[in-house]
Image (cartoon, helix red, strand yellow):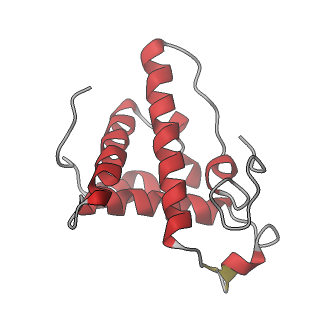
Amino acid sequence: MEKRHAMNWALDELYDELLSGEPGAILPANLSDEWLERLCAAADLAVEGCDSDRGHGEAFDAMMAIAARGIRAARTDEASPSLFLDGDCYLSLQELWMRVLEYRLALTRERGARMAGCASHELSLAGLFAPGRPGWQGGEAGSGER
């Protein structure tokens, strides 16, 4: 696949088509081929741009929006009450970034499975975004579901 150096879609499209509906729409297995490619490219741009002063702002914003949506959908107040106060989520940028990296990996796996004609690797929102997943402060490695 050819690397894109800029997003050819707007953040409002992401909101309208994926973020404003059912939370499960952001799971890699549920994405259309077009959105899978778009988000793979955005994830690559966001990660590659994290070393520069400016980065790739819209790609970074897109990945953070998806991670925030996933975390909010996967959360259970009982699982980690210290992260939530009056419905708002409080976590470090490092923890949020770990969810972005996990999501990027899940997107890449899904793209590979589709290209190979293999079954998708089924993930749940909790499997990708819930507290207790590796990278969460205080979480144990491997304690999240996959």
Which residue is the extreme one toward the front? 51
The picture places residue 84, in percent across and down from the top left corner, at: 68, 79
The residue sitting at 35% across, 51% down in the picture is 47
The residue lying furthest to the right in this view is 78
Q: Residue at x 64, y 39 (%)?
A: 123
Q: Nearer the viewer, residue 2 or 134?
A: 134
- Residue 22 appears in the figure: no
Residue 143 appears anywhere in the view = yes
Number of dots carrying numbers: 0
Is residue 143 shown above or below 28? below
Q: Position of residue 9 (x, y in %)?
A: 22, 50
Q: Is residue 137 left or right of residue 98?
A: right
Quarter of the image with the N terminus is top left
User: Who is closer to the viewer here, 35 or 42?
Assistant: 42
Does 33 sit left or right of 117 as displayed?
A: left
Position of residue 27 relative to residue 140, above or below, is: above
Residue located at (31% from left, 47% from top): 42
Residue found at x 73% / y 67%: 138
**Within the image, what quadrant is residue 63 found in?**
bottom left
